[in-house]
Image: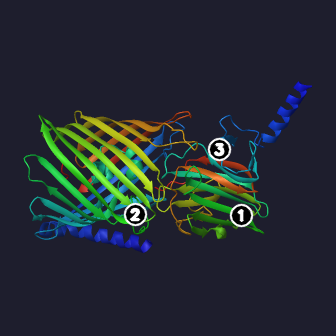
């Protein structure tokens, strides 16, 4: 009987204590889309191997090559009404001091903005070609230029150039600064994220 | 932009066609240097563009302005998204005749720091920038507008002290005017010179500081060493190396990013204008940590054997093979192999360089 109580208690408490992150590593990190992330405090993200739901934030464990590096990020997912997702790049490991690309669903449009510190610029006008529910973007963040040079493409393009970009900060709005760290991650509020990846910049100026 | 291009071409045409006429009476000299370069991937990891073509065309005018001042105007055409665009590289007035042992430049120029940054790219002893130079100074170099003063200290040995201050609105290659920095960019370069038998060596040390309008503080510390053995006009041996450390800081953050890198390039002069050298590159971010706070060993290293054929000071053919390894803790090494080719030629005169 005692053995039964112990076993039952173990099962009960382990079930209560576990997060919904089935792919949690022994180091406390989680794998998503083959990338190792660390969840921020108070995050209640539900992270599966190929889907993120819920609310919270997570930072990629592997740092960027250097603070003033250029990188390309791909993000895909579903933005249901009232949900939002923020891609944070070139931040510290608490996702502070970085460039924040905020995408939120407002009625039949995607509301987009870029934030740095207390400065915000809107990029909503450039996102109108996107299906408001499905977010499928590739973002080049050249933090090695000052201010950072950002290009955004729909993920369906095959050729990455300034001409095929739906947003090019050199022609549109000036990005309000440069990220000050070597980490990246996301903050999500009820968005469903199906893909997150990082690679070399898609566009390199001659 | 088209108007600007037309204006530049018209100006160049006017100056080139009139320079022969002007040369005798005013001393105006014109130099045109064409740098044709290409790179081809030797494996799938290489990010070579697999094409060859004019990389830059430098048009330089230089002359004494009067009995005191000299003037330099250097325009360079680069490929910008498939279109050759001329831009101002250097435009400065200078003199070494006002105060004994002192010379200065006022205007826009390549900063007199380190070794490579003094020279236009077509004058480098290799085709592409070493890793450390590309990371800290861009693929070509850092130019800016300001004042640079050099003073040859009257001592029994050679000691040249260069100090400069420039606008610092932008750093490196830029297509806009930038924004006013919190302090102007300032720098110093101290050079020595010594002959040891047939070997002439020139060590130098550099300090550069920049505090951008966006709150980024950059400090660069460098050591450069150049050695040459010449027989007549033939360069029998060349040693060129630079060691750099860069510290990046941001306002409101106590964290620093420290990166260190070097390159060294020994080159032997062979017979009949052939030269062979091997460049070694290394670069690391010393302070790189992962998000959990663990240090991450990392490096970019490259080996670049280079063969040059230089029949005269006006023409050059060059080929090199770049084997690069990127290493980061916990990941597979990434090796890439690239073939590089270069042909340069100079039309007209070319300004001489000290050592």
> Which quarter of the rendering shows the N terminus of chain A?
top right
Is the residue marked by circle 2 packed among few (<14), some (14-19), or many (20+) residues within 10 Å? many
Chain containing mark 1: A
Camera-side mark, 2 or 1 = 1
Is the residue marked by circle 3 packed among few (<14), some (14-19), or many (20+) residues within 10 Å? many
Tell me whether the residue at label 2 lies in contact with that at label 1, contact meaning CB atoms closer than 8 angstroms.
no
Camera-side mark, 3 or 1 = 3
Q: Secondary structure at mark 1?
A: strand
Q: Can marks 2 and 1 be said to lie on one chain? A: no
Percent of width and height locating residue A12:
85, 37
Tell me whether the residue at label 3 lies in contact with that at label 1, contact meaning CB atoms closer than 8 angstroms.
no
Q: Quadrant of residue B8?
A: bottom left
Instruction: Identify which residue is drawn at 65% across, 42% down.
Output: A35
Q: Is residue B152 left or right of residue B325?
A: left
Q: CA distance from mark 3 to mark 1?
A: 22 Å
Instruction: Identify which residue is drawn at 30% across, 60% down.
Output: B186
Q: Is residue B196 left or right of residue B268?
A: left
Instruction: Identify which residue is drawn at 83% across, 32% down.
Output: A10
Is the residue marked by circle 1 packed among few (<14), some (14-19), or many (20+) residues within 10 Å? many
Residue to which mark 2 is pinned: B170
């Amino acid at each position: 009987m005692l053995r039964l109580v112990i076993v039952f208690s173990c099962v009960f408490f382990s079930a209560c204590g576990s997060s919904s992150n089935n792919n949690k590593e022994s180091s406390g990190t989680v794998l998503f889309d083959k990338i190792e992330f660390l969840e921020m405090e108070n995050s209640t993200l539900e992270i599966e191997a190929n889907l993120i739901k819920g609310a919270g934030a997570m930072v990629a464990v592997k740092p960027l090559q250097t603070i003033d590096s250029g990188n390309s990020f791909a993000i895909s997912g579903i933005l249901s009404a009232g949900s939002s997702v923020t891609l944070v790049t070139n931040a510290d490991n608490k996702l502070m001091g970085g460039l924040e690309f905020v995408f939120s669903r407002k009625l039949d449009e995607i509301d987009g903005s870029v934030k740095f510190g207390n400065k915000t610029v809107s990029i909503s006008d450039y996102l109108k070609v996107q299906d408001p529910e499905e977010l499928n973007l590739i973002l080049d963040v050249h933090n090695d230029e000052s201010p950072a040079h950002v290009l955004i493409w729909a993920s369906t393009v095959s050729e990455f150039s300034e001409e095929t970009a739906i947003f090019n900060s050199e022609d549109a709005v000036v990005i309000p600064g440069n990220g000050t760290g070597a980490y990246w991650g996301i903050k999500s509020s009820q968005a469903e994220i199906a893909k997150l990846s990082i690679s070399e910049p898609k566009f390199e100026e001659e | 932009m088209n108007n600007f291009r037309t204006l530049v071409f018209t100006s160049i045409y006017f100056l080139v066609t009139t320079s022969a006429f002007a040369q005798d009476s005013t001393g105006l000299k014109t130099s045109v240097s064409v740098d044709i370069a290409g790179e081809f991937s030797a494996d799938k990891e290489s990010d070579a563009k697999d094409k060859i073509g004019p990389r830059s065309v430098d048009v330089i005018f230089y002359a004494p302005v009067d009995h005191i001042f000299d003037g330099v105007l250097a325009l360079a055409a680069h490929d910008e998204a498939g279109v050759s665009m001329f831009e101002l590289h250097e435009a400065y007035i200078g003199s070494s005749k006002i105060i004994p042992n002192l010379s200065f430049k006022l205007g826009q120029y390549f900063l007199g720091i380190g070794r490579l940054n003094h020279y236009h790219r077509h004058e480098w002893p290799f085709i592409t920038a070493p890793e450390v130079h590309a990371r800290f100074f861009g693929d070509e170099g850092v130019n800016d507008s300001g004042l640079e003063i050099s003073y040859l200290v009257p001592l029994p040995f050679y000691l040249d002290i260069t100090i400069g201050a420039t606008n610092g609105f932008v750093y490196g290659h830029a297509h806009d005017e930038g924004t006013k920095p919190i302090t102007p960019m300032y720098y110093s370069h101290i050079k020595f010179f010594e002959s040891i038998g047939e070997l002439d060596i020139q060590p130098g040390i550099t300090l550069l500081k920049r505090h951008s309008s966006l709150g980024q503080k950059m400090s660069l510390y460098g050591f450069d060493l150049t050695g040459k053995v010449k027989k007549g006009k033939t360069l029998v041996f060349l040693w060129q190396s630079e060691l750099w450390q860069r510290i990046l800081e941001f306002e409101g953050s106590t964290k620093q990013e420290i990166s260190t890198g070097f390159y060294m390039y020994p080159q032997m002069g062979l017979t009949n204008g052939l030269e062979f050298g091997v460049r070694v590159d290394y670069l690391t971010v010393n302070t790189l940590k992962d998000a959990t706070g663990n240090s991450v060993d990392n490096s970019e290293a490259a080996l670049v054997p280079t063969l040059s054929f230089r029949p005269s000071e006006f023409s050059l053919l060059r080929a090199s093979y770049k084997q690069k390894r990127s290493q980061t803790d916990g990941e597979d090494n990434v090796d890439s192999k690239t073939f590089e080719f270069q042909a340069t030629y100079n039309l007209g005169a070319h300004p001489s360089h000290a050592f």
